[in-house]
Image: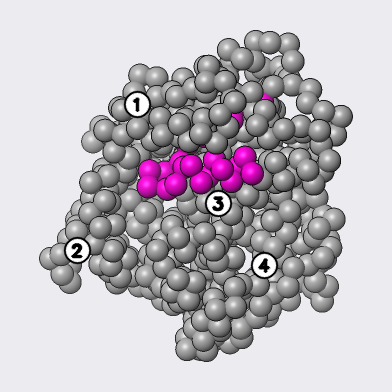
Amino acid sequence: MATRSYADAVEHLNTLQSNAAVLDAIRASGGGRASNKAFEETVEYLERIGYSPSDLNTLNVIHITGTKGKGSTSAFTESIIRSCRPTWKTGLYTSPHLVAVRERIRINGAPIPESEFAKYFFEVWDRLQQNTKRASEETSIMPGYFRFLTILAFHAFLQLGVDATILEVGVGGTYDSTNIVPKPVATGITALGLDHVHVLGKTIPEIAWQKGGIYKKDVPALTVEQPVEGLAVLRERAAELGASEFAVVPTIPELFTTTLAGLAGAHQVQNASLAVHLAHAFFNSRQKKATEQLLPITFIQGLKNTRWPGRCQTVVDPQRDGLTWFLDGAHTLESLDCCTKWITSPGVIVQASGKTGSRVLIFNCTSGRSGSSFLAKIRDTIASQLRLHQIDESADTFFDRVIFCTNLTYADGHYKGDLTNNTISQTDLVSLNLQEQLATAWSDLIPSFPKSNTHVLPTVEHAINKVREVNQASKPLSVLVTGSLHLVGGVIEVAGLSEVAL
């Protein structure tokens, strides 16, 4: 290759994505082999680039999973540790990204620079291309997209000599590719969302068994309050795997009055509470106790400084007066409920004095999920919250316009490189089948809503252009973007919000 730039790295990385047809086949088969082989294959890929799993213990890992809130908890935990130990170097590995894939690998809270991402990317790529010896011929020479990024993160963190690593599980826990760290310093499980039972087609005990697979021998095993049947399984898994302790951490009351500006929403208090306890477990395990206090000033400062873009985030448009974006990648019934409660809190998107401007909803959801139930959840939660706060508005007229668009980034039919998504059926993209279904569902839900104010659009850029048309009026405009983190990332990219949002 003539060059080995960040763009080149992203282009190579995108070739490792599974296409929509492959994913459909995996889902149809129950996904068994794809997940069950992830652990052993990831170990093999790691060894092929020159490491053993035991090398990962030097990264001092806090491993976090759950069905909701795991990313936020990871961000809180990293920020607390950085606040307590400002001279340390921290590593944070999360997914998905919003605008740039390098967001998944953060050093001291910031996305790894493009030059370093490219450097470490091609070091891993070349080693895998050169060392093709495999235990099984069924194992592909190159790992899939997420597995490659996991190996890349491990390589980057080891090369950079991070002092503490916060590792967010991709999917599940037991078989996830992040679970190859033999002895993390602490492990934590966030809420087991009840609506994932329907989405994943599994029971709470089955989900809990998977998540509990991150617990390790002689390592603290923490979790938050869970459904009774899920908690029992987590307790059993902790005992089975030999955890040094199993603790159900309580919500910390003081956090309800702590302004978590970077991560708004009352539901974040539980995530922040788990992060506080994980940080204490981390310092205690390293015999470098942070403090006797549960919430010292360094912890509070770390929580306040946490930024996690695309989750209950308010962004004032830097280029257009009167335009404010409300960004939340909620993609389950429970997370949409939390999102809607956030925006209908007085002073966020509504005022006790009544409506003072226009509001737009931009929505999309992943194919296969029930869009109509998601939209019903938004509408019903708005109605109940307006009544709760005694705001004289109707849920049916809360939004002046609704836009249903695909996650395709640009009007000329392409994604930004980092946002390329081969997992979506091209047929669905071209036909706008899902978006038309969403529009029909919205019309059925609110028959009085003007059809002229319901827009089905092919790309994020089309959606942004429609918002800018509306924004030409003199009154304030509030835009809620939700239903998909990929959609939120596309909006940040196309609307030019990166400098203020990320």
Nearer to us: label 2 or label 3: 3
Labels 2 and 1 touching (C-beta < 8 A): no
Q: Quadrant of residue 173?
A: bottom left
Precedes in sequence: disc 4 or disc 3: 4
Q: Position of residue 99 (x, y in %)?
A: 49, 37
The type of residue carrying mark 4 is Leu
Q: Quadrant where the C terminus lies?
A: top right
- Judging depth in this view, the residue of 21 and 369 nearest the camera is 369
Indicate the amino acid at tag 3: Leu
The quarter in which the N terminus is drawn is top left
Mark 4: secondary structure: helix
Q: Residue at x 40, y 63 (%)?
A: 201
- In the image, is 89 to the left or to the right of 126? right
Mark 2 and mark 1: Cα distance apart in space: 31 Å
On screen, residue 258 above or below 110? below
Disc 2 to disc 3, C-alpha distance:
36 Å
Question: Which element carries disc 3, helix, strand or loop?
Answer: helix
- Report x, y in % for residue 115: 44, 40
Crowd tier of the residue under label 2, counting other residues whose Cα lies within 10 Å: few below 14, some 14–19, many 20 or above:
few
Determine whether the residue tagged by mark 2 lies in a helix, strand or loop.
Answer: loop
Q: Residue tagged by mark 4?
A: 274
Q: Which mark is first along the chain, 4 or 1?
A: 4
Please give the range of residues in magenta.
Answer: 359-380
What amino acid is found at the position of numbered circle 1 in the picture? His
Query: Which residue is tagged 2?
Result: 139
Which residue is label 1 attached to? 414
> Distance of mark 4 from mark 2, alpha carbons?
37 Å
Mark 1 to mark 4: distance in Å? 40 Å
Q: Residue 473: x and y, percent?
A: 68, 10
Instruction: Name the residue tied to disc 3.
Output: 333
Residue mark closest to the camera, 4 vs 2: 4
> On the image, which quarter does residue 128 sit in?
bottom left
